[in-house]
Image (cartoon, grey):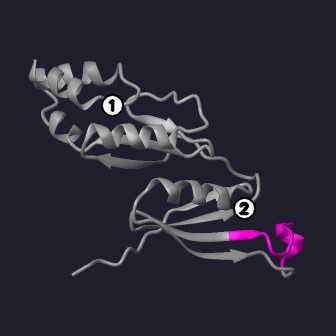
């Protein structure tokens, strides 16, 4: 029995929602634009947007629903919230890291990066929780020491550090 998603993240952009959604849906498989709503003349004295310009886009990334809003410059993204991409292989880590950091300096720490729209992402190997399970163990300490030196995660280096 599949579960209906009841929580949908909404990403507030100044006026880059359409460009950002096109970028994101090009990166993730099983992704699509579901519906685009546009500003009309009604409410123009409040929203100030030209009629016909993009207001909201409903979209999916790998089956997860999102909303993108062109809400104006009132709010900016910050690192207090990020979207986590769980990766099974180093090839996936490399792919998502490179694609999501396109157009940026690529700097991030411990798998974090900020894309060209200011959205924070974590590109994380799915094996990481297992490697960090016992916070009082020597393998945990070694793994953490390796991890904090990395920008993009290297699964083999993390596993080698864990093994000693």
Q: Secondary structure at mark 1?
A: loop
Q: Secondary structure at mark 2?
A: loop
Upstream in sequence: badge 2 or badge 1 = 2
Q: Quadrant of residue 153?
A: top left
Find disc 1 in the rendering and name its residue. 153
Q: Quadrant of residue 138?
A: top left
Are dots 2 and 1 in contact, CB under 8 Å? no
Q: Would residue 99 appear left or right of 54 to someone viewing this image? A: left
- Residue in front for this viewpoint, 53 or 80: 53
Q: Is residue 91 above or below residue 34?
A: above
Q: Is residue 117 above or below residue 49?
A: above
Q: Which residues are drawn in magenta?
A: 43-55
Q: Is residue 60 above or below residue 80?
A: below
Quarter holding the N terminus is bottom left
Residue at horizontal 61 percent and vertical 43 percent from the top: 118
Find disc 2 in the rendering and name its residue. 71
Give how far across and how far down residue 17 sits, in percent.
66, 59
Q: Would residue 76 appear left or right of 99 to someone viewing this image? A: right
């Amino acid at each position: 029995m599949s579960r209906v998603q009841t929580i949908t993240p909404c990403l507030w952009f100044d006026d880059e929602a359409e460009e950002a959604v096109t970028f994101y849906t090009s990166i993730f498989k099983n992704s699509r634009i579901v519906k685009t709503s546009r500003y009309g003349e009604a409410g123009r004295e409040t929203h100030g947007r030209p009629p016909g310009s993009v207001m909201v886009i409903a979209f999916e990334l790998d089956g997860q629903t999102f909303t993108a809003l062109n809400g104006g410059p009132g709010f900016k993204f910050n690192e207090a919230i990020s979207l986590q991409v769980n990766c099974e292989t180093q090839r996936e880590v490399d792919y998502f890291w490179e694609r999501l950091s396109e157009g940026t300096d690529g700097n991030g720490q411990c798998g974090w990066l900020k894309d060209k729209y200011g959205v924070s992402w974590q590109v994380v190997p799915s094996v990481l929780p297992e490697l960090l399970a016992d916070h009082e163990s020597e393998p945990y300490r070694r793994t953490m020491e390796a991890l904090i030196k990395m920008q993009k995660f290297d699964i083999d280096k993390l596993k080698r550090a864990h093994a000693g």
